[in-house]
Image (cartoon, helix red, strand yellow):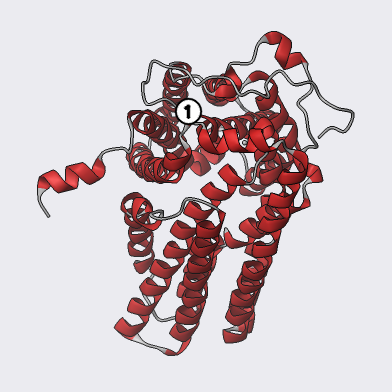
Amino acid sequence: MTLTALLSRARPPSPLAGRLSTQSLLFALGQGTFMTGSAVFFTQIVGLSAAQVGLGLTLAGIAAFVAAVPMGKLVDRYGPKRMWAASAAGQAAMFAVWPFITDFRGYVVMAVGMEVIGALGGAAYGAYTIDVLPPDERVKSRAYMYSALNLGFTLGSVMGGIALAFHSNDVLHALPWFTAVVFLVNATAVTRLPRASHDERSPEDRRLRIPGPGPLRNPGWLLTNFFTGVFWTNQVLLNVVIPLWLVEQTDAPRVVLAFLFATNTVMCIFLPMVTSRGVRDVPTALKAVRLSSTFFVLSCLITLATHDTVGWVTIFLVWLGHVTVTGAELYLSAASWSFEAELMDPRQRGAYQGAAELSGTLGKVWAPALYTFLALNWGAGGWLVIAGIVLVATLGIHPSTRLARRFLERHVPADVLADARASGGDEDEQATVPPPREAAVTMPESTGSR
């Protein structure tokens, strides 16, 4: 392949997708740099024990879970772009304060605050990208942004690793400040993006209650995201179960782990545009889910076979199991972007993002403990049970998406749904997206997410 062809494939689908990908890269660069050295920072600089770090992260995760829906409602009220920029600026401020934390109480307060602000940013980012991207470009653009995100995390990990290599507390002190600067640059860049439709609402409109029942009353949406959460347990296989299996149940050398994660990183940078090709609506997204589940099951079957293999055969099969579970991740990403675009009430995208985070978390939070127990204690039978869980979720998500669509058809005016499918961002980066026709509609008595 010529250099020109490679450069052509590296181009973003549109100028707007390129700008959004820059935000993804900046976010991941800052986050990846800090997270790489966070364990050392918390223990060596703050002086916490490993147990205190784990407890703080658990409390922060609970806070983000509880805050998901309220943060989503803030996005709908004040606009996704405004809330996305506010979240990035808020996280920059929080990172800047990290070096001054000296005890467990301060750490917990900071970690909780960071996660709650992050929940706001997640809902705002998701709502903004769906709002501003043209429907026929959403999946393609999100795939390009996903590649940029993984590239940013890779660069961040490298920078964090370089900082750790100095073995200097002064350098570790600088990690959160570096991240703060990156997030502040990101917040500034977000403010310069074109406004999405829901950023155009007037102060008077923001005081009105948004019409229609909320996402917590949409069982199809909640179930779809619960099953999507189950599918995202592929990350538990990727990051926890397969590495533990390699170390405890196979004869493969531990250094193979580095090769496995490097393979995953390369695939997630270069293949999202390929695996998202053809995914444009709910039926094609369900096809991508079936492909994702097939790769997940193949990973389970391949990995369980390594218990009885030796030498290079084991190394190859463990690597192949990691490749197939990465395939599950890539196809699921493409499917989830279509579900977000097609199955949300266009008037409440922030709240729907928050509800998705809520139900999606319930679909995967149990997996690390259960999958580890099943694989390491039940052996082949455990791997088959893990595969069976994903197959059940695959069967369940088909009726749940139909249920979610019927809910929208009952409670959202047809012209609003039609407008949502036909509207999108303007490729002229100086233009703004016109406000939706429903923006000024008052709420009837029945009320209703980086």
Of the pair 184 and 258, the residue shown nearer to us? 184
Of the pair 411 and 54, the residue shown nearer to us? 411
Of the pair 124 and 157, the residue shown nearer to us? 124
Of the pair 146 and 425, the residue shown nearer to us? 425
In the image, residue 318 lies at what x, y percent? 40, 75
Residue type of the residue flagged with mark 1: Pro
Q: Residue furthest front?
A: 415
Relative to 378, is 146 on the left or the right?
Answer: left
Residue 411 seen in this snapshot:
yes
Q: Quadrant of the C terminus?
A: top right
Q: Quadrant of the N terminus?
A: bottom left
Q: Is residue 449 above or below residue 93?
A: below
Q: Residue furthest right?
A: 445
Q: Residues within 10 Å of mark 1 (few under 14, many from 20)?
A: many
In the image, residue 40 lies at what x, y percent? 49, 42
In the image, residue 402 lies at what x, y percent? 68, 57
